[in-house]
Image (cartoon, rainbow, N blue to C red):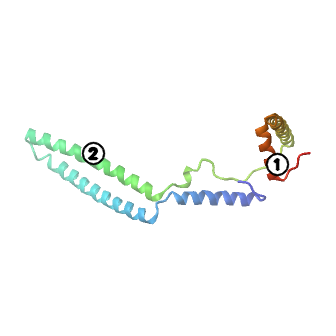
Amino acid sequence: MEDESPARAHDLANALIDAWLATTKPPPESKLELTRKLKLSQDALETVSQLLKRMAGETTTVIQPNVKYELGTQAVQLLQQRNGYVEAIAATELQLRGLTRDVVVSPPSLPTEATKPKKSLIAVLAALGSGFALLLWVFMRQAWQNAAQDPETLEKQVRLRAALGMHRS
């Protein structure tokens, strides 16, 4: 951002970043839905964790081989569900929080030293721009004159000049 005052430009850039970050947070109606989903996921995670603790305590008392295998399969499924709930909770919390300032690659800063305009570069670019504009004008004039060779196009040009208030010299 540029401004006459570097401090004002700095403040303006910070305000722009803060406004953008505020737009990444969910609107109120979405926030309510996300909060509800977060609560459900947290409750489900708590339930699955309790089941896993209970299974871990009870599997040592079961000695039958087939039952032990079936409990192990169930425990693996519960662990997968628990991991899914942990990921869902983390994703929902991120959505509720929105983006933070740490995503800004280069925060605005005040310059440490004054810079002078590069007059030579400006002069070269102005000369190139002027040369291009002049060349374009010459080509357009030549195209206009070549088009005037056709009687139909000449009639259209006369009407266009009259509409623009230009008189033929």
* Residue 132 falls left or right of residue 53: right
Q: Name the residue located 89 percent from the left edge and 46 percent from the top edge.
A: 168
Front-most of residues 127 and 65: 127
What x and y, as percent, mark residue 155? 79, 43
Query: Which quadrant would the C terminus be assigned to in this image?
Result: top right
Q: Name the residue located 60 percent from the left edge and 56 percent from the top edge.
A: 17
Query: Which quadrant would the N terminus be assigned to in this image?
Result: bottom right
Q: Quadrant of residue 34?
A: bottom left
What x and y, as percent, mark residue 105? 60, 47
User: Label 1 neighbourhood size at 10 Å, few (<14), some (14-19), many (20+)?
Assistant: few
Front-most of residues 159 and 164: 159
The Cα atoms of the two marked residues, 1 and 2, are separated by 79 Å
Above/below status of 158 relative to 95: above
Residue carrying label 1: 161
* Residue 34 falls left or right of residue 136: left
What x and y, as percent, mark residue 119? 86, 43
Residue carrying label 2: 80
Of marks 1 and 2, the one in the foreground: 1
